[in-house]
Amino acid sequence: MTTPSEEHPCRADRRTFLERLWGVVWLGVAAVLLYPLLRFLGYHAPRQPKLVKVHKEPPVGGFVVEHDFILFVGEKGPWAVSRKCTHLGCRLNYKEKEQLLLCPCHQSRFTVAGRRISGPARRDLPTFGVARMAEQEGKGYVVTL
Ligand code: FES
């Protein structure tokens, strides 16, 4: 007859295996429960920056309209402003004559620097980093979204 301290080695291995399996199951359950909770709370995994090449070099005072941003070139250098309205996300149009970004959905208005002027949007537009394209890639700018 064996005492409790003299367990069969296979029995201990089975217990260890079951304990580890139980731990993995609990990790899986925790991940399944936490993921939607974190999503609900607004957690977003940091995304990779997206580089967009603009193969144009507008003169000072000029601009280039792209899908996600408008690149302006001023005396102090270039800058890029998002075209996504901070109200509900409509794509902004640039009114060159008035030097304004105008939302076609609910008429929010922004300056070329992205500052909110009027409308239901409450926040300024995000701006993006702009760098001159490397010499070997040609002329233009790289915008980091
Ligand atoms: S989406 Fe632009 S003002 Fe509403």
Image (cartoon, helix red, strand yellow):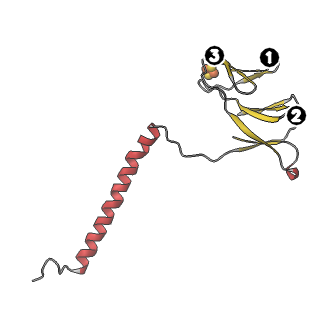
Looking at the picture, how far across and down is residue 16, in whole percent? Answer: 29, 70
Looking at the picture, how far across and down is residue 91, in whole percent? Answer: 68, 26
72 or 22: nearer the eye?
72
Contact flag, marks 2 and 1 (Cβ < 8 Å): no
Looking at the picture, how far across and down is residue 58, in whole percent? Answer: 88, 34
Give residue 104's quadrant in the image: top right
Q: Residue at x 81, y 35 (%)?
A: 78
Q: CA distance from mark 2 to mark 1?
A: 19 Å
Q: Secondary structure at mark 1?
A: loop
Q: Amino acid at mark 3?
A: Gly
Q: Secondary structure at mark 2?
A: loop
- Vertical comparison of 70 with 101: above or below: below
Q: 10 Å neighbourhood of mark 1: few (<14), some, or many (≥20)?
A: few
Q: Amino acid at mark 1?
A: Glu
User: Which residue position holds label 3?
Assistant: 119
Mark 2 CB in 8 Å range of ligand 1?
A: no
User: Which residue position holds label 1?
Assistant: 98
Q: CA distance from mark 1 to mark 3?
A: 16 Å
- Quadrant in which the C terminus appears: top right
User: Which residue position holds label 2?
Assistant: 58
Q: CA distance from mark 2 to mark 3?
A: 30 Å
Sequence-wise, the earlier of marks 2 and 1 is 2
Give residue 115's quadrant in the image: top right
Q: Amino acid at mark 2?
A: Pro
Q: Is residue 67 visible?
A: no
Q: Residue at x 80, y 16 (%)?
A: 98
Q: Is residue 126 visible?
A: yes
